[in-house]
Amino acid sequence: MLKKFLYTLWISILLLLVFFSLKNGSFSTFITSMENRTFDIRQSILANSGVREPNPDIVIIAIDDASYEYILDNYGEWPLPRDIYAKTVDYIEAQNPKNIAFDLMFVKSIKDNKNADTALINTFKKYNNVYTAMNLDDQPHDLRTPPVLPESLAVKVQGTSKKVDPDYLEYSNCRAILEGILNATNNIGMINVVRGDDGVLRKMPLFIKYHDKYYPQLALKVAFDYLGMKSPDEFILNDNGKVSVKDKHFYPDKDGGVILNWYGAAGTYENIPLYKLIKAANGDKTFNYDFSNKIVYFGATASSLFDIKTVPVDKVYPGVEVQATYVNNIIDGSLIKKCPTGINILLGLILAILTIGAVFMLPSMPVAFGVSVSVYAIYVVLTYYVMRFFNLWVEIVPPLAVAIFAFIAAVIIKYLIKSRDFDTQYKLATTDGLTELYNHRYFQEQMQLQTSHAKRYELPLSLIIIDIDFFKKFNDQFGHQSGDAVLRQVAFELKKNVRAADIICRYGGEEMSIILPNTRYEEALKIAQKLCDIVSSKKYKLSNGRESNVTISLGVSSYGTDGETPAQIIENADKRLYNAKNNGRNRVN
């Protein structure tokens, strides 16, 4: 049993190595996409179960469909004039919010309104807790000359790590926001996102490279401000893949993106339509909301404004809520960490071992299958709870793929072993142990079968019965060990010189027989004579190292002329063998 187990384990490990060697192939891409899907399902279950509550201090001023309509009706254009934002900020700041962040980019307006721009710029000068966004891109340089950003916006990235590539997200251009804002504040962060190959946004970058400098994400700055920490100015990469920023530690992927932990579908955070805030800033007393100690995020939620993402928990998810989720994760330390590859491999091996054990230890294959499926189901459930309680992404698909390969390999090997055992048992039951010829029982079965076949299809059939001459005297003179040696060597010569279709058996004692399907009597005589000559021409080694000549006598009979039943055919072959021995031996009759 141990040998079977180790053999199957070896095959499973081989399959595992082959599996991981395909990491750059389409199969690996398929496995990765399936694993991402399991992550999305786990996140959706967690989001819908309400086990994670979003931070109530995060509120979104939403440019929703109603606000968009209000803006067009009252201001006649989009984007909204910047002085309106300045008024709303003043209104909110009067209630002492923790910070205000715009998931909006204040680039050159459609209509040149310098007074409105100046009002907004002065707002950024006035308040040190107001943040805004900028986005890097790869637009061609003949379309837009890449601007030089203020040195104060960049951060240092120290150290190296094989697990994180700080240059993975690198852009050659950007659409700079108003120069006045760039000069007025350092509270500017990037809002670039990282989408998977399937278009789903699961993670966000910590920083992005532009012109050999690194620029942090807006959410990082907002979250650090909320926590009462200085805005991040240095990222330290460690060999183990950890990225440290002050007292915070992150575990990004190779591309530098950290995996978000989602709290719910769109609308998870409290949304206040922008138009209500505009009215309140203009003196409308019907609006009443307490912004004290809040993180206030401005952003578009209307689908017509094209800031919609697909995330694990929702197909239509506003970009501003992605930013809010990122901030929320940093504040409560709930960003998802991927389980190390080595642990995932180990888990795959454990599942494979349990699967192999079930296949070999349980006699019933349906029971083994049921146990294996139960183990897989328990493993999937455990990965859910590990993500729920430890924010750890333990892979499902690769370990299960290894386990399923191991199951298939174990089943194949088990049935191959069973088949081999059956063949061994059958061989033991039908083969003579000394000569390795078929035994007498098999001879009788084949005579019955071959006779019936010859009768049904009117085919010829012949039989040769062979006896080693003076074998008893040979045993008496040289000993039984020498006799056994001669029996084996004669059997070998006979087997070597008959056709593949011929069936050679040990008939009993020193007698052997050859069933010759589809062979007439005259042809059988020729074959018998050839065998007689071959045996007599050889010298045979005895057990004591000596050599001796051996001769045989042969009797031949055929179906039809010598009978139509096995007994009749055998009886006539025996008579002719007897005649050959009486007529001097070493001959055919």
Image: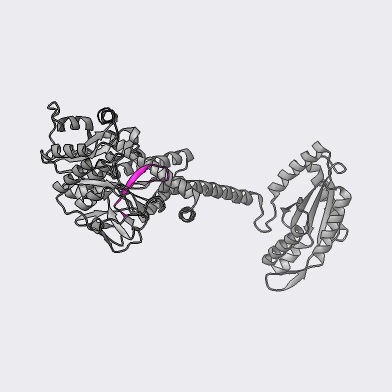
Residue 269 percent across, percent down from the top left? 23, 35
Residue 302 percent across, percent down from the top left? 31, 33
The one nearer the camera, 31 or 515, is 31
Identify the residue at image location x=20%, y=44%. 118
Q: Is 71 part of what is drawn in magenta?
A: no
Q: Is 199 part of what is drawn in magenta?
A: yes
Quadrant of image for the C terminus: bottom right
**Residue 377 appears in view:** yes
Determine whether, in the image, residue 10 is placed left or right of residue 137.
Answer: right
The one nearer the camera, 461 or 153, is 153
**Residue 57 appears in view:** no
Residue 553 percent across, percent down from the top left? 82, 58
Identify the residue at image location x=74%, y=41%. 449
Q: Which residues are magenta?
A: 195-208
Residue 236 percent across, percent down from the top left? 26, 60
Q: Tell me: residue 559, above or below residue 13.
A: above
